[in-house]
Image (spheres, rainbow, N blue to C red):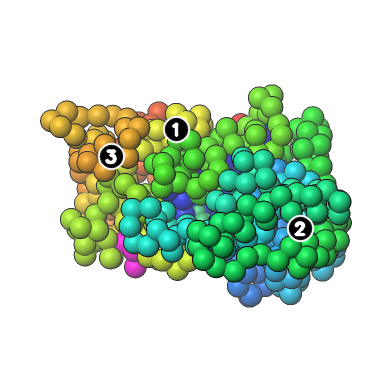
Amino acid sequence: MNVIVIGAQWGDEGKGKVVDIFSAKAEYIVRYQGGNNAGHTLVVNGKKTVLHLIPSGILHAGKICLIANGVVFDPNIFFEEVQSLAESGVFKQVLPYEMIRVSERAHVILPYHRTLDRLREEYAGNGKGKIGTTMRGIGPAYEDKVARRGIQVIDLLRPQLLKTKLQLALEEKNILFKHLFNTQEVEFNKLYEECLKLGEKLKPYVANVRVILSEAVRDNRPILFEGAQGTLLDVDHGTYPYVTSSNTVTGGVLTGSGLGLNLKAKVIGITKAYTTRVGTGPFPTEIEHTEKELANEIRKIGAEFGATTGRPRRIGWLDLIALKYAVEVNGLHGLALMKADVLQGFDHVKICTGYRYASSTFYDLPSSIEDLEKVEPSYEILSGWPRYEKNNMKSFSDLPQEMQTFVRTIEDYLGIPVVLLSIGPGREETLLLQDPFQS
Ligand code: GDP
């Protein structure tokens, strides 16, 4: 069986840990959307390595890591990560390109995309137009893709085609830089030479990833699809416009990797036992203003600061309306419930089971962010669970009764099982209740 791992909230759910555990069971690990705006901190041979682009499955020997067509690909970041992994001794037995392949069709993030990203955010100032992007050029690269002005990886290996496409792209970008943002224009020759050099260096990694995947599916090789960001950040189904620029939901797996509906896969949604959000946008169960002390405590215990930007994350209670939405738009088969340890020792925990608005209660996410901003959460209040000795928690029945009730309440509401329960950051602090690769 293949497995798709999807963020069921606003990202940062702890996908890195789940992907690490599931990677051991897969032969191929695939990134299919987003870019280097994901962030996993991993400790390899005692050395801290942050991977934003290369699938974290790279740390497991003998796996093939694929960056598929739906990703926007920054070659400079890619080479930085390859270098850092090499320094950690990951490629001792193999050449890096034996473990990593990059799709010919992935779109390239160029320096002007990063500049544009930064200028747009600065231009918006602190006003409503600010999205809170990671400023890595992801959004502008996706814009160019859809506007049919993008440069694909394969173009870096085709000097003539690259020249034509880059000239066309710069024509328009330079008008924006000069006349809208009053900044320096991009010099064609310098960038062109740079792109050709990157292409040369990238050559051994470039492949038709769709074909590799199609053969893997045909031969029943287990594949892990590693989603980045989260469902509520999906460009179509998230809290638009405070979203990322790609399809983070299950549908993105197919378009982002070139597979069809014959792909057999279990879709696992990752959620924390509470909710966090980075950046701007509506967040119904946020407690920053109502229970500030508690928000600070959760942030501190849960280390809720962005892996990519270091920004403090906004904190809130678990939102089952938003999770039910994630179950539906992704077709989730199961949940990985993370960071349940963070809430231990609290005398109660809340879960949102309805949205109140204009004296009615709703059980679905409103389509307009204007409405989502106004809803008041209705909470079910559950007893908290006492602190526990984590070494004694070997199976579900070892958990404090109140914690079991918390898990069962979530399962009953959503109608899907919790297949993995994470009770600490370590690999061993995990209860795998069902193995999705085996079902
Ligand atoms: P991702 O982008 O979805 O992987 O999420 P983050 O990187 O923001 O979150 C992962 C962080 O949470 C890492 O520092 C993990 O070590 C930590 N983490 C993952 N699962 C748990 C857990 O169950 N409990 C605690 N306390 N920390 C966890």
From mark 3 to mark 2, how far is it between C-alphas? 48 Å
Q: Amino acid at mark 2?
A: Ala
State yes or no: Cβ of the residue under disc 1 lies below 8 Å from any atom of ligand 1. no
Residue lying at the far front of the rendered structure: 179
Tell me, yes or no, if residue 302 can be seen here: no
Identify which residue is drawn at 49% across, 40% down.
235
Identify which residue is drawn at 71% across, 58% down.
58
* Nearer-the-camera pick, 434 or 51: 51
3 or 2: mark nearer the eye: 3
* Nearer-the-camera pick, 224 or 38: 38
Q: Which residues are magenta?
A: 298-302
Q: Main secondary structure of the magenta part?
A: helix
From mark 1 to mark 3, how far is it between C-alphas? 23 Å
**Which secondary structure lies at badge 1?**
helix
Q: Is residue 213 above or below residue 172?
A: above
Residue 61 disc label? 2
Q: Quadrant of residue 386?
A: bottom left
Local crowd size for mark 2, using a 10 Å CA cut-off: few (<14), some (14–19), many (≥20): some
The answer to which of marks 1 and 3 sits earlier in the sequence is 1
Quadrant containing the N terminus in the rendered view: top right
Identify which residue is drawn at 81% across, 37% down.
211
**Which secondary structure lies at badge 2?**
loop
Tell me if residue 299 is in the magenta stretch.
yes
* Nearer-the-camera pick, 160 or 244: 160
The answer to which of marks 3 and 2 sits earlier in the sequence is 2
1 or 3: mark nearer the eye: 3
State yes or no: Cβ of the residue under disc 2 lies below 8 Å from any atom of ligand 1. no
Name the residue that disc number 3 marks: 370
Tell me, yes or no, if residue 139 can be seen here: yes
